[in-house]
Image (tube, grey):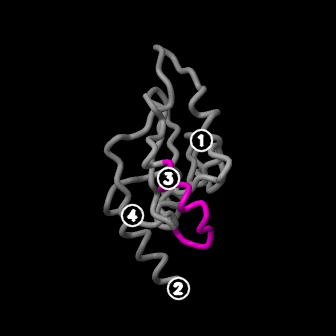
Amino acid sequence: MIILTPELRDRLLINGRLRSVDHVPIVKFFNPVGAATWLATELDDDGKTLFGLADLGFGSPELGAFNLLEMASVRLPFGLSIERDLYFEAAFPLSVYTEAARKAGRIVLDERRLREAAEALRERG
């Protein structure tokens, strides 16, 4: 599978040039045979350094940079590789996903937890 379409790459690059914005994640990657999940909001001009929320399945998701080429080169059992969730559509900015992940110890996508995280962030100001 092509890990990023040209349209997704362009959207990530645009976000990468606007660093001071709390972007909505553009793409979700996942390990189909493991617990790792990544939500990417930005791509650097180098075309390989993504920024977003990474959860490697150890109970401590974190914000940071990850390398698109390294992700694309991972070879998993059964001939699988890291995949892009074709149906992912983010509804909240990255800060909300980060807050929900902090509370849950993993990236969560369910509406209730994300709304609770958004409310907690609003209350904090």
- Please identify, in this view, whether the residue under mark 4 or under mark 3 is nearer the observer: 3
Confirm whether the magenta stretch covers residue 2. no
Relative depth, front residue between 85 and 63? 85
Marks 1 and 4, the one that precedes in the sequence: 1
Q: CA distance from mark 4 to mark 2?
A: 17 Å
**Residue 57 in the image: above or below residue 92:** above
Residue 8 point in image, percent of width and height: 45, 49
- Residue at label 3? 10
Q: CA distance from mark 2 to mark 1?
A: 30 Å
| Span of residues in magenta | 9-22
Q: CA distance from mark 3 to mark 1?
A: 31 Å
- Residue at label 1? 58
- Residue at label 4? 114
- Please identify, in this view, whether the residue under mark 1 or under mark 4 is nearer the observer: 4
- Please identify, in this view, whether the residue under mark 3 or under mark 1 is nearer the observer: 3
Name the secondary structure under disc 1: loop
Relative depth, front residue between 6 and 77? 6
